Image (cartoon, helix red, strand yellow):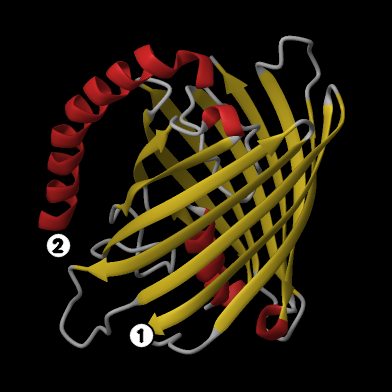
Amino acid sequence: MYSSSTRRSMLHDCSHGRAFVLLVALLIPCAVLRGQEHDDDHEHAHLHFSHPLVTESPSPDTKIRLDYIAARTSDATGVHENTVRLEGEYSFTHSVSLSIVTPFIWRTAPALERASGLGNIELSLKAASLAFGERGLLFGGGLSAGLPTGSDKKGLGSDHLVELEPFLDAGYKRNTLELVGLTMLSSTFRRRAGEEAERNLTFDFSALYRVQSRLEGLLEVSTARGLVGPESGSQQTFIAPGLKLYPFANRKFMVGASLELGTGIVRHTYALLLSGFYHF
C-alpha cells in the first residue's frame, strides 16, 4: 500500500491520525472474531497468494519485508533518490492483518536538494474473504493511513499532512498462474492555509507465473491519476517486470528484484526495487 506514494514523491487531521488508530482498535476485535468463525467453516478453502513486488498481495500474511529502492530520472531534473523500507505485517487470522511500513529516504541529486530522513510511516488494515477460495478467488480490501512523520522542508513526506487510502483488491489463482488487481483512492487531510486538497486514484495489476518450484516471473502495471490538486488530470503509468527466488525448500524466505519503467509523461523515470521477505 505504499508504492503509489513513493512514486509521487519521486516526481515532483493529527486528529485524523488518532481517528485512524481508534478505528483500527475498534475494527480488529470484530474482524478477528468474524474471521475465526469464518475460518472454522472454510479452513479447507484457505487460499494464499505469492506476494508480488510492486502490487500488494490480497492475502493477509505474517511477515517481515525489507526493500531497497533506487529511483532515478534521466531528464534535466536528474533526481537520484534511495529508499530503505522495513515492513512488518501480522495476520490475526487467514482473513485479517495489520501492517506498518517505515521508510528511510536519502536524496543525492540534484546537489541543491540533497536530504535524508524518515518518510511517512504507513499503517494498513487488510481483510480478505475466503468464501470463494475453492474456486481460486480471493476478494478483500482495507484502509491505509500515511502518518506525518516526514519533513516538508526536506521534501521527504510531510510533517503535518495525513493521507487516508481505502482500497479494494481481488486475486485469482490457478495452478502456476496468479492474477492480482488493486484499486486505491487516496486523500490528504490536516492541510494548512493555502494548501490544495489532493486526491488520487490508483490501479495496480500483477501477473505472476511459477517458472520452477523456486522461481517466479512477474509483470506488474501501476497507473495513478490525479483527481484533485496540483496533479489533477495527469496520469502516471509504470510497467515493472520482475523475478522472485526461493533459496530454501520451505519457502519462508524469498528474495526478488523488479525494474519499474515509467511511460508517457514519466517515461524518464525508473526505479530498481530489491526485496527480501521472511514469512512466519
Q: Position of residue 128 (x, y in %)?
A: 41, 36
The type of residue carrying mark 1 is Gly
The type of residue carrying mark 2 is Asp
The answer to whether 100 is drawn above or below residue 190 in the figure is above
Q: Position of residue 24 (x, y in %)?
A: 21, 38
252 to the left or right of 61: right
Q: Residue at x 37, y 53 (%)?
A: 120
How many angstroms separate mark 2 from mark 1 (CA)? 18 Å
Rendered image: mark on residue 72 = none
Q: Position of residue 88 (x, y in %)?
A: 45, 29
The answer to whether 114 is drawn above or below residue 216 in the figure is below
Q: Residue at x 72, y 10 (%)?
A: 250
Q: Is residue 118 visible?
A: no
- Quadrant position of residue 275: top right
Q: Badge 1 is on which residue?
A: 229
Q: Is residue 107 visible?
A: yes
Circle 1 sits in a helix, a strand or a loop, which is it? loop
Q: Position of residue 156 (x, y in %)?
A: 44, 62
Circle 2 sits in a helix, a strand or a loop, which is it? loop
Q: Badge 2 is on which residue?
A: 13
Residue furthest toward the right? 212
98 to the left or right of 235: left
| Label 2 crowd bin: few (<14), some (14–19), many (20+), radius 10 Å | some
| Label 1 crowd bin: few (<14), some (14–19), many (20+), radius 10 Å | some
- Quadrant position of residue 42: top left
Q: Residue at x 42, y 53 (%)?
A: 168
Q: Residue at x 53, y 29 (%)?
A: 133
